[in-house]
Structures are given as C-alpha cells and as structure tokens.
Amino acid sequence: MPNDTPPALTHLARLAQFAALDLVRRAQGRALGALGFDPTELPFQILASGPYWRLRDYGTAGAEISLLIVAAPIKRPYIWDLAPTVSAIRYCLDHGLRVYLIEWIPPTVTDVPVGLDECSQAISECVSKISSEPNGTRPFLIGHSLGGTLAAVYSACEPHAIRGLLLLGAPLCFQPATSKFRDALVAMVPPDLADAAVVPGSLLSHASAFASPRAFVWSRLADAAASISDRRALEIHARVERWALDEAALPGRLVLQILERLYRENRFSRGVLTVLGRRIGPSDLSLPTLAVVNTADEVAPLASIEPFLEVLPTKDTSLIKYPGETGVALQHLGVLVGREAYSSVWPNILAWLTAHR
C-alpha cells in the first residue's frame, strides 16, 4: 500500500525518535556516572550571557594572558575539564592563564534560529566583554573540533579583536577526498534537514558513526581493550564514554550551514563564506595561528588543516603534529584527554602563548 503520510510528518517523526534516543543515552550516561565517572568540573561564574550562550569565567585575576575557549556545540563543554588529571582548563589555570569558556545553550523549537552569524556575534560579544574587564586584555581564542572551526570563522571576521588563534583538531578545508569522513557525511545529509528547528544530538552521533565506523566504533572498542591493563587509561576511557552519552540538541540552521556551506561547498577555504555581512576566507586570518593535528584522527586529518594554513597571509603560523595515544576512547579527543598530550603537546601550546603575549 502506498504511504500517504505527508513528508513533513515523517520528518518530524524521525526527529522525535532521535530526541527520545537523546533521553535514553543521557540516562545511560548517568548510570555510568553513578559508577564514579561523572565529570568533576571546576567552579566558575557567569560573566555574561545571551539567549543561546553563556560566558564562563574560571578566574586567575591579574593574569597577563586571557584565553577564551570556544566550546563545540556538540555535547557538553566539560570535555575541557573532564577530570583533575586530564583537564585543559586546570592546566591553563595552573600555569597562570585567565580562562574563559563560551558555552552554547541547547535550543528549543521556539527559540530564534541560530546559525554561523549568530555564533560569530556571540563570540564577538564575549571577546568585547573580556577585553573591557578591569585590567582586561584582548584574549587568545582556542577551540577544538567544530569549536575551533567556529573560532576561525569569527577570527576571520574580526582578526584585530584577538591576540591569536589556537586550533585543536579543527577542520577548515573540506575539499572532496580530504577525508573519508567528510565525503561520507556529505553524501548522507538528508534534504529535509532544512526544515528542522532543532537537531537531536543522537542524530549526529549516529551519522558520524555511519560516516566513519572505524573512528567512532571500532577504534573505541580497540581502545577499551588496549586500556584494560592500564587503570588510569581505562578510567579516562570510561569518562570519555560518559561524556559521549551526554547528548545535547543543536540548532537546525547551524547544522545545515555547517554541512552545506562548509563541508559540502567548502566556502570558507575558498574565500566565499559570508558571515556577519562580510565575505571571508583564509586571506582574512591575519593573526598568529597555532594548529594541533592528531595524525591518527580521521575526523580532522592533516589534509583538512594544513592546506588552509599554507595560504594564510601571516607568516606567524605553527603546526604541531601529535600521533595520538591509547586510553582516549576517540582519537579526535586525544589532545584534550590524553596523558601524553599533556606531557608533550600542552607545554608547547603554553610556550607559544607565552611567546605571543
């Protein structure tokens, strides 16, 4: 029999199924947290806020270097402060930096649509707030994964508002064949995604697993097996899995623009992306830039970052290659949660910041 269900209703039903799966996965995460793997975040105060973002301030008044973390809107930002032994925020505070973080508030269907313009405007407001604080200074901007991509897009709009840009596993170049993950993800973008006001986090988790099963499924199982004999590695792995289950919804407009304008059409790398009324590209990133690439990462491989860096107008660019490690669950997260990353990569990040203060 023919299916007489209107496409819009079918689409809503699929979204409702993934929204329900978000609830299930978060419940699974809480169960894992009950075993002792909940995050142990540092205290912070809210310095400013908007309808879809909050600016966290972690303190260290009087520091010469201010660092604004642009969290990725996927899942929760505590991946930056996962545990006392593996925490980018604690590491930076311990070394005398003033640390801020922009946290994205999960949307509801009644919220104003949020896309690249709105995210860049939010970052701009946070940068202005930090710079105007008593004894405030222009901050450095740092982001991981999609957070780094958003940080780079904003930096191209207002390069003189910040001191420098740090990109951790943040893809910027999306040419076809850049990575199997990019090609598979572009091929599976549903045409009716444009109608979604809110995209459940589970939908993106499943899409990522289908796009790169080796990165999001098989390597995680292999990492768990390799971590069994190392208690600390196994604990970090479990904490990452708990974080991965903590799904958060994303604005539909933002997801569509990222998939279409960045992943499919590669507009930013080609210099034809329009944000906040400006056409931007690599030629607009005229500021010191440091990128860290995990060479074992399929989500943001070297080919998705290096060609972009090579055409920047500034000569002050640096690239750190990090080989990945065991006990991080997902190699894409290694620079934020890996013990080797904190012993070999983060000292170099700190040295770069100090040299550019």
Image (spheres, helix red, strand yellow):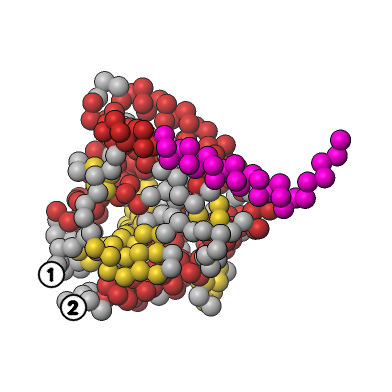
| Residue type pointed to by label 2 | Pro
Residue at 24% from the left image edge and 63% from the top image edge:
45
Instruction: Give whichever of discs 1 and 2 has the lower sequence position.
Output: 1
The boundaries of the magenta stretch are 1-28
Q: Give how far across and how far down residue 324 sits, in percent.
A: 34, 37
Disc 1 versus disc 2: distance between alpha carbons?
A: 9 Å
Q: Secondary structure at mark 2?
A: loop
Quadrant of the drawing holding the C terminus: bottom left
Classify 312 as above or below 248: below
Taking depth in this image into account, of 186 and 250 the one nearest to the observer is 250
| Mark number displayed over residue 134 | 2
| Mark number displayed over residue 191 | none
**On the image, which quarter does residue 285 sit in?**
bottom left
- In the image, is residue 211 part of the stretch drawn in magenta? no
Classify 131 as above or below 69: below
- Report crowding for label 1: few under 14, some 14 to 19, many 20 or more residues within 10 A (C-alpha): some
Residue at 21% from the left image edge and 55% from the top image edge:
43
**On the image, which quarter does residue 259 sit in?**
bottom right
Q: Farthest residue in the right direction? A: 1
Taking depth in this image into account, of 231 and 281 the one nearest to the observer is 231
Taking depth in this image into account, of 160 and 19 the one nearest to the observer is 19
Q: Secondary structure at mark 1?
A: loop
Residue at the spot of label 1: 62
Residue at 35% from the left image edge and 69% from the top image edge:
49
- In the image, is residue 13 part of the stretch drawn in magenta? yes
Task: Confirm whether residue 292 shows in the render.
Answer: yes
